[in-house]
Amino acid sequence: MNPTGERGSGRLRLKPYEKKLIAIGFAVIIAAAGFTVYFNENTPHAGGNSLVIYVYDSFLAYGPSYQEAYSTVFGTFEKQYGVNIVLKNISAAYLLPTLLAQKSNPQADLVIGLTEANGMEAIHDGVLQEFSSTADPYINSSLLADMGPAASYLTPYEYSYLGIDFNKSNPSGPVFVPSFPDLLSQGNLSSLIIENPTQSDTGQEFLLWEISYYEYLMKENWTAWWNASMPVISSNGNIYQSWGSAFNQFESNGTTRSLLVSYLTDPAYNYYFGYGNYTGSTVTQYNGKEYGWRTIYNIGIVNGSSKLSIDRKFINYFLNSTVQDALPTNEWMFPANSTVVLPVSFSVLPNQSNIVPLNNYLNALAIYRELPTWIQEWLDLYG
């Protein structure tokens, strides 16, 4: 299994299609949901068995060697089990919509990248095959709890708290922000870069972070913060359609004039690549405690796959050290396997044990029931 040298090469385009029900449960038109297919460039294994996997387009893309990471994660399995892996690389926001569009005629065996936010939608709409990995005992048990009933279908492989990135060293930059109300009172909204929750997983997770903070900690209506912040954020053009475009804008500002909704692991990335120690990232505080939203990424079997035996082997393999050791410095997420030793670069991060997951208050079932309404309310405010 080898990826192409140019990540955009070989890109195919699905025909535009409209779904009345997508991952977050509201109407949207998915225009030209493209995917890239990576074929095994080596001699096919005997028997010609193939395993088709849908994966989001940034998987393993941020490490020292994209091709080496892909070869380790996927090539090792190919050699061990004599199977040819075909990866179809899809934008993260379109993973579930693509599965829904193909429900009557599944085109994949496995899917990598569904989250705690859309996992319940996936099982409700019948696009996943039930399976519990034999590696579950090695998974951080709180991740399985956060997944709720979806844990019987999806297996967590990595996770991270969201964070608000800021510059630690520039006194003229935005001030360190410990809470959502402080973002309003400190006058930093014009510096805050966020992602659109209708187009970006990160944006959707940030919305859940804010809702859980206001509704369950402050006991206030979550729309109050957006009513105050939306005019400023929107008028400054600081709502981006993807994490990548938002991060590029943050970097183009030299991280001196911006705050970015991203991940708490970003300082480890800078440390690893020698970019300096100027970027910090923070969760939010309330009454002296730290609270954050934890994003959980999962792997699952596509309902209708005819290769269940090898599908199950691959998921169990995905939780072993070959894959899990590669995730921290290629995905910049925490591995789900709690026995994995983290790299030195992760020592610069805040102590995760001090953070209370807001997922404890807003569980997978609640997200499934309420997210369509919350998204519509956000859209109404966005106007």
Image (spheres, rainbow, N blue to C red):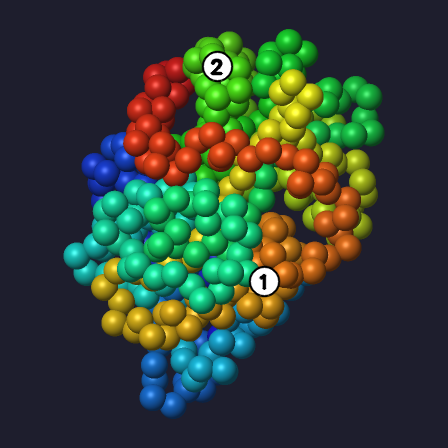
Residue 175 in percent (x, y) is at 73, 20
Above or below residue 125? Residue 240 is above
Q: Could you tell me which residue is drawn at 27 percent across and 67 percent down?
A: 305
Residue 193 in percent (x, y) is at 58, 27
Left or right: 98 in relation to 277: left
Residue 49 in percent (x, y) is at 34, 81
Judged from this view, the residue extending furthest toward the left is: 104
Give residue 308's quadrant in the image: bottom left
Residue 34 in percent (x, y) is at 36, 52
Amino acid at dot 1: Gln
Amino acid at dot 2: Lys
In this view, the mark in front (2 or 1): 2
Above or below residue 44? Residue 53 is above
Res 243 seen here: no
Residue position for label 2: 219
Q: Could you tell me which residue is drawn at 35 percent across and 19 percent down?
A: 377
Q: Could you tell me which residue is drawn at 53 percent across and 15 percent down?
A: 218
Above or below residue 151? Residue 215 is above
Q: Could you tell me which residue is drawn at 60 percent across and 68 percent down?
A: 321
Res 383 seen here: yes
Secondary structure found at label 2: loop
Secondary structure found at label 1: helix
Q: Are marks 2 and 1 in contact (CB under 8 Å)?
A: no
Residue position for label 1: 324
